[in-house]
Amino acid sequence: MRVAQKLYEAGHITYMRTDAPSLSKESIQDARNFIGERIGEQYLTNAPRIYASTENAQEAHEAIRPTNAYMTSDDLLNQTEEEKRLYQLIWQQYIASQMPDAEYLSTSAKINIGEYTFTAKGREVVFDGYTKVSQPFKSDTDDILPPLSEGESLNLTQIKLDQKYTKPPARFSEAALVKELEKKGIGRPSTYANIISTIQDRGYVEIQNRRFFVKKIGHIVTERLLESFDDIMDYEFTANLENNLDRVAQGELDWRNVLDDFYNAFQKDLVIASSDENGMRSNKPTTTSLICPDCSSPNMVIRNSSNGVFLGCSGYQNEGEDKCKKTLNLISGDEAISVDDNEEAANLLIKKRCEKCDTSMDNYLIDESRKLHVCGKNPDCDGYFIEEGQFKIKGYDGPTLECHKCGSEMQLKTGRFGKYFGCLNDNCGTTRALQRNGEPKPLMMEPISLPEMPCLKCEDHYLLRDSMKGLFLAASKYPKNRETRAPKVSEINNLSTQITEASRFLPNPEKHLYLMSAPETDRDGNPYVIRYNKAEDTHYLASEKDGKKTKWTAVYNNGEWNQNLKS
């Protein structure tokens, strides 16, 4: 939506918060003119193709389409590569929607071997139709079979034996979840992106290998809401409410009656859920026999929060000096079982069973010698036990690191954002992320706080951060505030002292200092923005005017900045 918004503001596409498939007569004629002139008369249908609306579609706007059929992604000069890719997708679907279907010659052969019959299928393209501009996903039947005749004898050259298992339903990806929301009539194009970000920001789910995994707090919140607000949590609620609102728009229902019917039922559920006696069940911590390492208080408790499952001192409830805020992070014992569905299913079969309710138990590593098993129904069931032994985090057999700040040992841990190395010196607290290739993330410049530089889109200020994609400005309260952008030269070229201090632990502490001598503007007076070239691992400058790139760039070579004007 963010990328589409930029294309819309630049005038390249129509309004994008719509799920209507209809096109205006002018846009249909524009597409047909392009097809006839640029692709070929044989790719024109006899009459324009009209697509029916889906149920509950919001048709205040037509379908998302380019504003000019003749403008391809190659014609976009001042857009990013991300914007060009999205525009290309929209353009392809738009043009293809007015082209004829593809035609195929399908072949099916049955081969008899003894008492068994094997089938081979293939198809050959006779007329490519709309696929000339919009390539479909390749099918298993897209292979072309050799010429065959009935009754022909074939030579058996090789037998391949493949053993396949029935897989559990695949977890949702972001795209699959949006498709399911559309299918059930939940949300609208203007709210899908917000739904996806909200369930992650609140800690209900996390993404691993591009798939959603429900976290413990997500299970708890869902159960409580289903128990107390079963009517609102019904999949049909949103669709039914949309139907009633459509009937209000058509004059069939009074909007006051619609809102009264909803609010009366909701208020009744809300009063019951708020009751101290029979209301919504709380998320109570589970008491254990573990002793707090800080204050030696007995009975640390298991808590479920948006940041995950952790152990907290029972003395947190005390007042004054007796209050203890000590917590212990718990590393999921099966956190590495997320790559393959079969591996995940097999992992479920070997989990311990709760002695109180016989439910499978989640397991967490407390440290190298203790594993905590917690009932899967926690906090509703307080079953748990502690397993003694020698444990290590799964999926990593590499060495520990030496802390680049204090020289102490760093060990691999798992936190909210994945695996990382943490310094064992409590007074240091330095961390380093672990990359997918098993190597620790290269050292980066420490963030530099810029309290005098307020964010443009939220109530916050910027930090100058370093990453594997170069320097960038980010809101200090990220990820709560998700604002990021590239810095202008004029915004950071007075930070030589801060950058030197923040880079003191890098192998090359002067890595970014050459940017301090960069020109603030191009020769036309437009401000230069700092960009990053990943292939060459260096920064360069690209000027902007009114938020759009100009043709001026500058690169640093042999100790000086060279400005260039692209033709």
Image (spheres, rainbow, N blue to C red):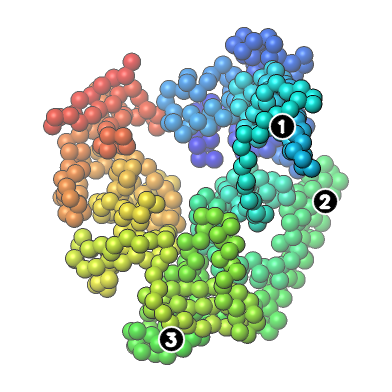
Left or right relative to 440: residue 100: right
Left or right relative to 261: residue 328: left
Left or right relative to 254: residue 478: left
Task: Name the residue beneath numbered marker 3.
Answer: 290
* Mark 2 element type: loop
Residue under the image location 62 percent in, 20 percent down: 132
Indicate whether 167 appears above or below 525.
Answer: below
Observer-nearest of 468 and 251: 468
Task: Check residue 169 in the rendering and tell me which mark sits there, or answer none.
Answer: none
Query: Disc 3 marks which amino acid?
Result: Leu
**Residue 285 visible to the viewer:** yes
Observer-nearest of 253 and 552: 552
Task: Check residue 121 in the rendering and tell me which mark sits there, or answer none.
Answer: 1
Task: Name the residue beneath numbered marker 2.
Answer: 254
The percent coordinates of residue 373 (x first, y second) are: 51, 78
Name the mark nearer the viewer: 1 or 3. Answer: 1
Residue under the image location 28 percent in, 26 percent down: 553
The percent coordinates of residue 256 (x first, y second) are: 79, 55
Disc 3: CA contacts within 10 A as few (<14), some (14-19) or many (>=20): some
Name the mark nearer the viewer: 1 or 2. Answer: 1
Observer-nearest of 370 and 521: 370
